[in-house]
Image: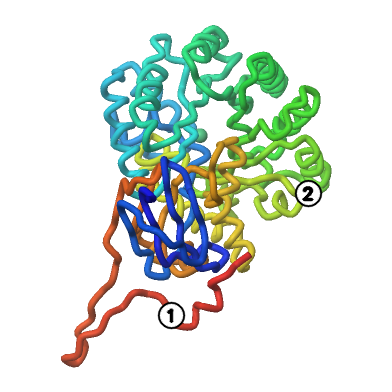
Amino acid sequence: MFDLMLRNARTIDGESIDLACKDGRIAARADRIEGAAANEIDAAGNIVTPPFLDSHFHMDATLSFGQPRVNQSGTLLEGISLWGELKPTLTVDAIKERALELCRWSIARGTLAIRSHVDICDPGLLAVDALLEVREEMKAYIDLQLVAFPQDGYLRDQNAAEQLTRALDKGLDVVGGIPHFERTMADGGESVRALMEIAADRGLLVDMHCDETDDPMSRHIETLSAETNRLGLGGRVAGSHLTSMHSMDNYYVSKLIPLMAESGVAAIANPLINITIQGRHDTYPKRRGLTRIKELLVAGVPVALGHDCVMDPWYSLGSHDMLEVAHMAVHAAQMTGMAEIRAMFDAVTIDGAKIQCLDGYGLEVGCNADFVVLQAGSVFDAVRLSPARLFVVRRGQVIATSSPVTSELNLDGKTSQVDFTLPNTSAFASIR
Ligand SMILES: [Zn+2]
């Protein structure tokens, strides 16, 4: 007797499957599984995917929109100073309350793993304490990976080094950084080297805010890649944002991307935020500011996507829907080919899981029984429509449901239904 049976589903590769869950894991996967389960759900031919992942987020700031005021210029720097105004008024309870609400939004959207950066520059480490509690309280539903992030600069803020040590001792999972915010290029490089050594000593993953600027000379990703090589940390290090790569000299990039590929550094782009925050000093033409996702993928550099912000000092919009993020990446990076749309879907699912080094992720027998049934017949429609998450399953339990979305028309006295799929989109059922 299984705990849960999913019937009549289709994988993102177009294969028809049933999935049987037992003791929190996928116990069987086949075209048709014989046997009963305590609970059975019918996918009705829709696709099932492993859960969505957000590979770059700020849970300490989320849902604080308008506190104490709104970012008028929309720039990164006004966002950082606004966050500085908000910080002295924060309490553990207020941070927790907002973060827990965000977790509820995420679950409803089928996002069951989040890597969140946590500002460690507040001497009280309130956000660290709050998010460690959230990680523990929500662990049955969401994998929360916490990055020790020196928002005010590891060297620029004279207390950051000690604060970072305290935060890691409390149990944060990943070493962060922000080299482009240090006072000089040399300080930026020094901060990368120091933080990489801390990660190597402690056996931790690394994810730095790296070159989040339109300055083509911001080249800390080169140092991050070289340090990854030197310390043998390939597969455990990510550079987030990398927006300066958008503006870099092409000859320099022809040397940089192979170095990144060789070192095993991953790239995490945040298309919603990058497209709105970068290029703000430009008149026209205005740069998009997104990193070179297409070229990185061709070179074999793993790429994941993050939402980065939802209703905070940097970004007022969003509902933590990772399909919205993939949709923006398809547009802003001009990745409209079928294989490219699939790559952006993978960047919010399986490729994010590899970069976050998550165990038990996937739909194979033995994996965690975590999956999402979408109101869509293909990856193409999933990215095009950002459809309802009909069932969200965690460890074999249904933890969220949404009703299918349809609209009813009344034209010339006749009623008909519109669901925004076309009969001929079966051609896109399988995008590999
Ligand atoms: Zn960020």
Front: mark 2 or 1: 1
State the residue at coordinates (35%, 60%).
388
Q: Above or below — where is 69 with respect to 41?
A: above
Asked if the residue at tag 1 contacts the one at tag 2, i.e. Cβ–Cβ closer than 8 Å, the answer is no
Q: Above or below — where is 11 with respect to 137?
A: below
In what element is the residue under mark 1? Answer: loop
Q: Above or below — where is 431 with respect to 276?
A: below
In what quadrant of the picture does the C terminus appear?
Answer: bottom right
Quarter of the figure with residue 262: top right
Specify which label sits upstream in the sequence, 2 or 1.
Answer: 2
Badge number at residue 250:
2
- Crowd class of label 2 (few under 14; some 14 to 19; many from 20; radius 10 Å): few
Looking at the image, the residue that sits furthest to the left is 413
State the residue at coordinates (73%, 32%).
234
In what element is the residue under mark 2? Answer: helix
Image location of residue 184, percent across then percent down: 67, 21
Image location of residue 363, percent across then percent down: 52, 52
Q: How many marks?
A: 2
State the residue at coordinates (82%, 47%).
254
In the depicted view, which residue is nearer to us: 363 or 134? 363
- Residue 292 is left or right of residue 420, and the answer is right
- Residue 260 is left or right of residue 302, and the answer is right
Q: What residue is pinned by disc 1?
A: 422
Mark yes or no: residue 78 visible. no
Q: Amino acid type of disc 1?
A: Leu
Image location of residue 253, percent across then percent down: 78, 45
Q: Amino acid type of disc 2?
A: Asn
Q: Above or below — where is 375 with respect to 84?
A: below
State the residue at coordinates (72%, 27%).
233
- Residue 349 is left or right of residue 40, and the answer is right
- Residue 169 is left or right of residue 299, and the answer is left
Mark yes or no: residue 193 visible. yes
